[in-house]
Image (spheres, rainbow, N blue to C red):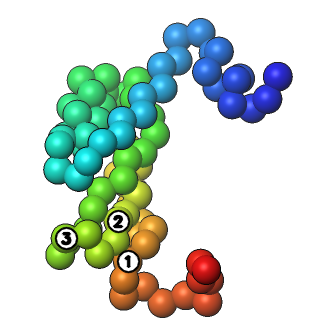
Amino acid sequence: MNAGSQLVNKPGIVHLLLTGRPGIGKTTVIKAVATALGERAGGFYTEGGPGGRQGFRLVTLDGQEVVMAHVNLRSRAALG
């Protein structure tokens, strides 16, 4: 059994993953579900930053956030 199947098979635990085009309400749905579940909710969502599609940030349901990617973010790491 791998780590992924252990997450899926825990009784009483539901994982929610939404995909789709930008602007269709994925983040809105996640925020509404998290609000409805209250303290029973855990995890994170990603959100586009200001200025359009120039980057995104990761926001945890306990209020922490970090910029994960942005066109102005400087790093030694590179793809390609």
Sooner in the amino-acid sequence: mark 1 or mark 2:
2
Residue drawn at the location 29% of the way across and 75% of the way down: 54
Residue lying at the far right in this picture: please name it.
Answer: 1
Q: Is residue 64 above or below residue 56?
A: above
In what quadrant of the picture does the N terminus appear?
Answer: top right
Question: In the rendered structure, which amino acid carries the disc numbered 3?
Answer: Gly
Callout 3: helix, strand or loop?
loop
Q: Nearer the viewer, residue 30 or 21?
A: 21
* Residue beneath disc 3: 52
Task: State the mark number for residue 56.
Answer: 2
Question: In the rendered structure, which amino acid carries the disc numbered 2?
Answer: Phe
In what quadrant of the picture does the C terminus appear?
Answer: bottom right
Callout 2: helix, strand or loop?
strand
Are the residues flagged by discs 1 and 2 in contact, CB closer than 8 Å? yes
Of badges 3 and 2, nearer the viewer stands 3
Q: Is residue 48 above or below residue 74?
A: above
x then y, percent, for residue 10: 63, 15
3D distance between C-alphas at marks 1 and 3 = 11 Å
Residue drawn at the location 52% of the way across and 11% of the way down: 12
Does any portion of residue 62 appear in the rendered image? no
Question: In the rendered structure, which amino acid carries the disc numbered 1?
Answer: His
3D distance between C-alphas at marks 1 and 2 = 6 Å
Quadrant hosting residue 69: bottom left
Sooner in the amino-acid sequence: mark 1 or mark 3:
3
Residue drawn at the location 26% of the way across and 69% of the way down: 53
Q: Nearer the viewer, residue 34 or 19?
A: 19
Residue lying at the far top in this picture: please name it.
Answer: 11
* Residue beneath disc 1: 70
